[in-house]
Image (cartoon, rainbow, N blue to C red):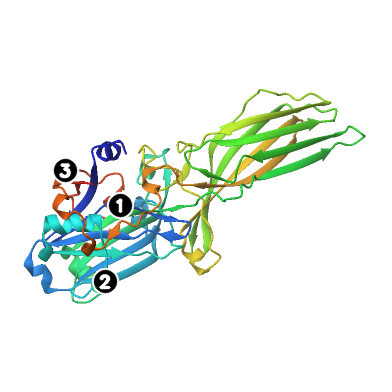
């Protein structure tokens, strides 16, 4: 992330590339994270360069797929680990593209000018709305679990074949790249504040306690503190000794629409003592803050990758479409704020507030997709497009070793005007 910010300030843009094992063609992508914002999916755009003329002897295809991996890598030997295909779409891009690129993006124009018009093929791939986002189930408590093979993962595959369905027999003439997909939801125009009010009466005329818990809004980013207002009106003879406030994450692994695993993680806590205990015949109103953290005990659902990476956040809330697409989500994530008051002797009051967490709005990956396509006739300043500067970089943030059959991952840096 720091590298990306530095390049942005220098007016440069990263371009990732990978070459097939036979060195016949190379795939170029401007980024590896793609966003669906409010049910509008941005397009995957890139360029393929033919490094060997023989690569043009067969059709070239692009496939984008999402898989649900369930179980650790060590379970392969026992045959317990499973992989389920959640989404797959394939299109031919050469010699006769099934999806004609009418307008080239700025990235495509610069790459075509740099790499050569006759040896390059630009491609644009549009994913369906409602497809599952990237989610990885991660545990830091066991070294064997740090492979985080369980979760939803995306890959882009380019392969050369006479037959669209004959990818496996041409494994040397293909490129696999791990990508990530995020779902981002804008806050509603009308601010809705989730709240719950409880009243507990005690026997023998001991009075009652009224508790009201309220969030400042319904939608937060996963990097944003949650603000809770708690009101306690104690008209009983009891003493409210303390309060425990937690943000809980629920992650359910789905296979065929059925839950096969549900994990609960506490991703934020607040145990302030200000205002407590609440004595009989008194009332308080206090503000509490919960700061989400991806460092937890046990398992936690992330948006793909190791929690130690700055570009990895907690997985966002899964928004259901109430259509058959919900059966192929792979992993369903939800959040809840739990407020628990303790009066002693096993007497408690519990408020539960549902809350939506989404990928950080201000994060550079989630800037609202812009239409940077321009008609070539309209005269993009092609003469001043700048030179491509290639810089080699390990493709480690994606934890993509499960997808890659090659060991070379490269990033190119391109002047951006």
Query: Dots 2 and 1: beta carbons under 8 Å?
Result: no
Q: Is residue 322 left or right of residue 238?
A: left
Question: Mark 2 vs mark 1: which is more N-terminal?
Answer: 1
Between discs 3 and 2, the one toward the N terminus: 2
Q: Name the residue nearer the viewer: 404 or 24.
A: 24
From the viewer's perspective, is 320 left or right of 199?
left
Q: Residue furthest front?
A: 378
**Callout 1: few (<14), some (14-19), or many (20+) C-alpha neighbours within 10 Å?**
some
Compute the Cα span from label 3 to label 2: 31 Å
**Which residue is drawn at the image coordinates 36% and 54% (left, top)?**
370
Q: Which residue in the protein does label 2 denote?
A: 100
Which sits in the foreground, 365 or 294?
365
Residue at mark 3: 391
Quarter holding residue 79: bottom left
Residue 355: x and y in percent read: 59, 46
Q: Which residue is labeled 1 in the image? A: 32
Whole-Å distance between the Cαs marked 2 and 1?
A: 22 Å
Figure check: 42 above or below 213: below
Viewer-nearest of discs 3 and 2: 2
Give left or right: position of 405 versus 368.
left
Q: Is residue 19 visible?
A: no
């Amino acid at each position: 992330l720091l590298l990306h910010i530095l390049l942005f300030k220098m007016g440069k843009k990263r371009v990732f590339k990978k070459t097939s094992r036979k060195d016949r063609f190379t795939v170029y992508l401007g980024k590896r994270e793609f966003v669906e914002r409010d049910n509008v999916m941005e397009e995957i755009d890139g360029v393929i360069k033919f490094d060997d003329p023989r690569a043009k002897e067969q059709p070239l295809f692009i496939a984008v797929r999402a898989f649900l991996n369930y179980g650790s890598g060590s379970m392969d030997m026992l045959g317990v680990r499973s992989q389920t295909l959640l989404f797959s779409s394939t299109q031919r891009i050469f010699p006769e593209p099934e999806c004609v690129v009418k307008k080239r993006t700025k990235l495509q124009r610069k790459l075509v000018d740099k790499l050569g018009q006759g040896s390059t093929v630009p491609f644009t791939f549009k994913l369906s709305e409602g497809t599952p986002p990237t989610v990885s189930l991660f545990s830091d408590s066991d070294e064997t679990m740090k492979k985080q093979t369980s979760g939803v993962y995306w890959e882009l595959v380019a392969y050369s074949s006479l037959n669209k369905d004959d990818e496996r027999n041409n494994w040397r003439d293909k490129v696999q790249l791990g990508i990530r997909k995020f779902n981002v939801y804008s806050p509603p125009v009308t601010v809705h504040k989730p709240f719950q009010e409880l009243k507990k009466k005690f026997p023998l005329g001991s009075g009652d306690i009224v508790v009201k818990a309220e969030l400042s809004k319904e939608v937060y980013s996963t990097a944003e503190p949650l603000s809770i207002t708690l009101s306690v009106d104690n008209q009983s003879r009891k003493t409210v000794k303390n309060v425990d406030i937690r943000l809980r994450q629920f992650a359910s692994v789905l296979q065929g629409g059925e839950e096969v695993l549900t994990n609960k993680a506490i991703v934020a806590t607040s145990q302030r003592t200000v205002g407590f205990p609440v004595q009989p015949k008194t009332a308080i109103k206090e503000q509490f803050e919960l700061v989400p953290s991806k460092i937890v005990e046990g398992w936690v659902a992330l948006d793909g990758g190791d929690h130690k990476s700055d570009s990895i956040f907690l997985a966002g809330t899964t928004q259901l479409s109430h259509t058959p697409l919900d059966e192929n989500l792979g992993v369903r994530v939800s959040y809840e704020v739990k407020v628990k008051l303790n009066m002693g002797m096993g007497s408690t009051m519990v408020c539960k507030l549902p809350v939506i967490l989404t990928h950080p709005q201000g994060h550079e990956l989630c800037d609202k997709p812009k239409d940077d396509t321009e008609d070539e006739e309209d005269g993009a300043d092609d003469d001043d497009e700048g030179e491509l500067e290639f810089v080699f970089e390990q493709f480690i943030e994606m934890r993509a070793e499960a997808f890659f059959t090659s060991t070379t991952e490269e990033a190119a840096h391109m002047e951006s005007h």
